[in-house]
Image (cartoon, grey):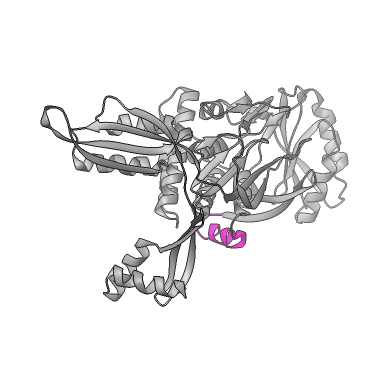
Amino acid sequence: MKTLYLECRMGAAGDMLMGALSELTDQDAFIERMNHIGLQNVVFRAVPSEKCGIIGTHAEVKINGEEEKSFDVHKHDEHTAEFSFQLNGISSAGERERIEHSLQDIDHLEHAHVSDEGLLTYFYNHDLGYEAENAVRSAIHDENASIEIVSKGHAHHHDHGHTHGMQMDDIKHILCHLDISEKVRKDALEVYDLIAEAESHAHGIPVEEIHFHEVGTMDAIADVVGDCILFEEIGAERIYASSVAVGNGMVKCAHGILPVPAPATAYLLQGIPSYAGMIQGELCTPTGAALLKHFVQSFEVQPTMVTEKIGYGMGTKDFEAANCLRAFLGETEDDGEVCELTCNLDDMSPEDIGHAYDVLFREGALDVYVTPVSMKKNRPGWVFTCMCRVTDKDRMMPLMFKHLSTLGIRESTCRRHALMRTVEERMTSFGMVHVKHSEGYGTIREKAEYEDLVSIAAKTGRSTAEIRRQIEEELAK
């Protein structure tokens, strides 16, 4: 079974997840696709990055030439202030990088950044304001540059992103006009629904009145859409993740200085194993938490799997430990315990039962079926059965109670033995066909995907049985 395992022991953010997952696919093709889906003024790059000697990918997303940055609060600097200069005459990228590098050595300055327009923004300790100003002036020794103080204010007015907030309708409008599949669009909308619910709970206002800040910027929209595309491309049948490191301390955001994890992140992580760890800083963002909550089916130690690929997604911050998220893609055996959930039905329409089928399969059920039976009072009815992994039963039972009319569900556990299954593309006289390959216990089977047979039958006018026989003969040769 194709399995994806996400190691989140250094936290989880949308860009880190995108960097790791992109290394499991055709990364160049993914970046090219992201740059043409219709996000205005957004440029994607896969940037090689090193953390503690490990090489991975930083998924860089720039809006109008600038990349989103988040700011942790260190060394009791809750009383910091924001200071901006206009650096007239600084235009080259090399000179901007030189200035930023020279400011890194000044202890009481943090997060100095020079924009393409020459605007230098940084944070400094409120009690060292004049010293900070003089330090900046002495650090910039380009004789062609003049310095003009533009603004000076408290840090909590700073916004992570490049916009002052969007409402849910704005985000839905953007997502509905992107060149993406309907599945990706649906996943992205559901991820934002989770974030909206968390923000609504944190601020005590209705969802429709929520103004997204950090997670409402185009940066975060790009992260969410990019990750949803990668999950679709990878097509893992099973997604696991480790417990999630959230970090310690405080973080500056649009609403002020907040504890780590931020309230929305803490709300989203309910029901998910998480821990603080030793790192001072924000390791898990609301976007990262919502993506994990939506896609991950089980949070546990890495299962026994034959790993085929490993991806490393790098964050922008540097800590004493490697700031990265690892993704393992491989195969797991299907042998093991499965849970069988059954109930009796005698008062539901076939349409409603069919809807319950779709819901349970979509949420990861191994199999769903009904058996006709004769029930009390001589009523015809059905035994509804949902087979799932033991780790999924607590998700499946509430769905069964929600979508079925039953008042009780029976549970039993049994051993399951299954062949290892993969899907391969094979060239045939009808063109490229998806073939299911099953192997194990001394048995090998191959079978063409039924949907492909139907598509060929529609084009050729031949029966699916005839097409299947010809493909099987070709595969045997």
| Extreme residue in the left direction | 378
Q: Position of residue 446 (x, y in %)?
A: 44, 63
Residue in the foreground of this view, choosing between 366 and 116: 366
Can residue 245 be seen here? The reply is: yes
Q: Quadrant of residue 172?
A: top left
Residue in the foreground of this view, choosing between 181 and 199: 181
- Residue 96 versus residue 383 in the image, above or below: below
- In the figure, is residue 117 to the left or right of 441? right
**What's the magenta region?**
25-41
Residue in the foreground of this view, choosing between 146 and 67: 67
- In the figure, is residue 385 to the left or right of 37? left
Residue drawn where x is 61% and y is 32% of the image: 243
Can residue 164 be seen here? The reply is: no
- In the figure, is residue 339 to the left or right of 454? right
- In the figure, is residue 177 to the left or right of 52? left
- Residue 14 versus residue 38 in the image, above or below: above
Can residue 235 be found in the magenta stretch? no
Count up the numbered dots.
0
Residue drawn where x is 18% and y is 39% of the image: 349
Q: Where is residue 272 in the image (x, y as percent from the top left)?
A: 54, 29
Residue in the foreground of this view, choosing between 417 and 396: 417
Q: Position of residue 129 (x, y in %)?
A: 79, 27
Q: Quadrant of residue 300?
A: top right
| Extreme residue in the bottom direction | 429
Q: Position of residue 418 (x, y in %)?
A: 47, 48
